[in-house]
Image: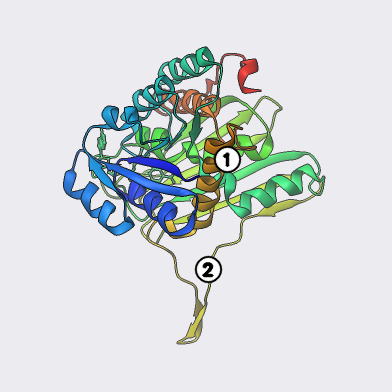
Amino acid sequence: MSVRLAIIGAGLMGADHAKIFADDLPGSQLQVICDMDQARAKAVAVATGARDVSNNPEAVIARDDVDAVVVASPDFTHAPLSMACIKAGKPVLCEKPLSQSSVECLQVMDEEMARGLRFVQLGFMRRYDQSYVEMKQALEQGQLGRALMMHNFHRNVETPAADFTGAMAITNSAPHEFDVVRHVLGCEYAAISAYQPQRSDARLAPVVMVLETQEGQLITIEVNNNAAYGYDVRAELVGEAGSIAINPVSYTRTDAKLANATAYEADWRGRYAEAYRRQNRAFLRFVKTGNFPEGGSSCWDGYCSSVVAEAGVRALNEGCKVPVEMIAKPEFYA
Ligand SMILES: NC(=O)c1ccc[n+]([C@@H]2O[C@H](COP(=O)([O-])OP(=O)(O)OC[C@H]3O[C@@H](n4cnc5c(N)ncnc54)[C@H](O)[C@@H]3O)[C@@H](O)[C@H]2O)c1
């Protein structure tokens, strides 16, 4: 039986999700593409063979011919649309972040716990990226000894909008880092500090964060949204007995003019194509079996990222170390 899907939001990510389901994931059927911008919805529907288009997300979620939903509209829509999916009893793959407000994350968790079933898988797809999978394995198999530090770099060519701020770098870009570090190390955060170097122009400077885990490990995260040269994500996990680092992913090398060179991509979609496929395949299995994917990202994980991001924004604004204070993890998400 095919899972009949609705994709809400037909921008960069929605179009990418639709293409993955249409091209790579048998067992799914694109039923509706929904976007406030009907031209975008139609273009994605034509490109992927989706059956219908809409500009009304709530009506789409309620449709009898929709089994499950992918939310890829802007951040502020994620929590309300996830809540609507839970109320309709439909599994949802919701893009990150669940919400930029930890209070709103708690409301989604409450709704899910009240239903007594898991409905929401979050789009923290780095958990499915082979580099992080191998890092986690190396740590769990004891090759590195106890984890001491993890250094993370997230660089984009330029900010998505001219008015993108340091706070947005923390609430929109850094959550991938917050989540994947928690996932790889199996840790929770205790405190965060955030800094920015001075640029020579008016562009947004990188945000550099130092986080302490509850087990006393140190995590550094650089989010540089104006790195200029390409999309580049790096990480190194340092243990007491060894370290493991992500290799740059590149299929070719050019040798010319007395140099060898590999190319950078302009954005994340190529770098993480296989991670998105694995994540979306896991979501389909979740829809079919009702079993939440092992290692998948839940509302609890969305809440944790949101609490850290809120503390990070405070740390940046106030220039001080801020404690990360979370509720106890509900048994429901154990
Ligand atoms: N997992 C990842 O690696 C990753 C990468 C980039 C973006 N994202 C997240 O994905 C989401 C979408 O990002 P994007 O880059 O595709 O943005 P985008 O601006 O390209 O697309 C968003 C689309 O949503 C539509 N939209 C706005 N409000 C809507 C509503 N209420 N109902 C239906 N459609 C609506 C817009 O018209 C637009 O077409 C964001 O929340 C972002 O944080 C995740």
Q: In the rendered structure, are the residues bearing label 1 and label 2 in contact, judged by CB atoms less than 8 Å apart?
A: no
Q: Quadrant of the C terminus?
A: top right
- Position of 186 with respect to 261 (left or right) is right
Q: Is residue 73 above or below residue 88?
A: below
Relative image position of residue 138 (x, y in whole percent)? 75, 49
- Position of 201 with respect to 72 (left or right) is left
Residue at the front extreme, as displayed:
1
Q: Secondary structure at mark 1?
A: helix
Q: Secondary structure at mark 2?
A: loop
Q: Which labelled disc corresponds to residue 28?
A: none
Q: Is residue 128 above or below residue 307?
A: below
Number of residues whose C-alpha sits closer than 10 Å to that of mark 1, classed few (under 14), some (14–19) or many (20 or more): many
Q: How many numbered tags mark residues here? A: 2
Relative image position of residue 319 (x, y in whole percent)? 44, 26
Residue found 55% across the figure and 64% down from its top = 249
- Position of 243 with respect to 266 (left or right) is right
Q: Is residue 98 above or below residue 280?
A: above
Q: Quadrant of residue 166?
A: top left
Q: Nearer the viewer, residue 318 or 8?
A: 8
> Is ligand 1 less than 8 Å from the beta carbon at label 1?
no
Relative image position of residue 252 (x, y in whole percent)? 52, 76
Residue bearing mark 1: 180
Residue bearing mark 2: 250
- Amino acid type at circle 1 is Val
- Amino acid type at circle 2 is Ser
